[in-house]
Amino acid sequence: MITEEQLDAFRQSGETVRVVRDELESNDVSGIVVAWDDASVMIRKPSRRVVKLSRTYLYQPAAEQRRSPLSEPT
């Protein structure tokens, strides 16, 4: 699960993040962190739509190479 500090750093920098939800790259969500609570994160996509995603997904900077959600340490 992503920490409060990581989410706050993404929000303050305005950096685009990639949310890896499963093994299919086509299911990834990219956008900027807008808000969060204990269980979810709000991401604003480039189309300006806002989506609510679980904090258990893998969050990484969009500029980095995509990592597999299964390779993330728990």
Image: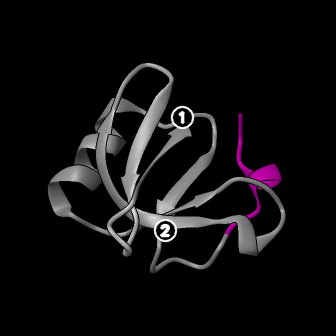
Tell me the quarter of the picture where residue 24 sits: bottom right
Which x, y percent locates residue 26?
73, 74
Q: In the rendered view, would you say 72 is above or below 65? A: above
What segment carries the magenta color? 67-74
At horizontal 62% and vertical 35% (from top left) the residue drawn is 56
Is residue 49 on the magenta stretch? no
| Marked residue nearer the N-terminal end (2 or 1) | 2
User: How many other residues sit within 10 Å of disc 2, few (<14), some (14-19) or many (≥20)?
Assistant: some
Three-letter amino acid code of the residue under disc 2: Ser
Number of numbered discs on residues: 2
Q: Amino acid at mark 1?
A: Arg
Residue at 72 percent of width and 65 percent of height: 27
Q: Is disc 2 placed on a helix, strand or loop?
A: strand
Q: What residue does disc 1 label?
A: 55
For this view, does 13 lie left or right of residue 58? left
In terms of secondary structure, where does tag 1 sit?
loop
- Which x, y percent locates residue 72? 71, 49
Q: Farthest top residue?
A: 38
Quarter of the picture containing the C terminus is top right
Q: Is residue 29 left or right of residue 49?
A: right
| Residue drawn at x 50%, y 60% as measured from the top left | 60
The alpha-carbon separation of the residues under discs 2 and 1 comes to 14 Å
Q: Nearer the viewer, residue 51 or 30?
A: 51
Classify residue 41 as left or right of residue 74.
left
Q: Position of residue 73 (x, y in %)?
A: 71, 42
Above or below for 74 versus 43: above
Q: Say few, some or many: other residues with alpha carbon within 10 Å of mark 1 (under 14 / 14 to 19 / 20 or more).
A: some
Instruction: Give the labeled residue for mark 2.
Output: 30
Residue 68: percent from left, percent from top: 76, 62
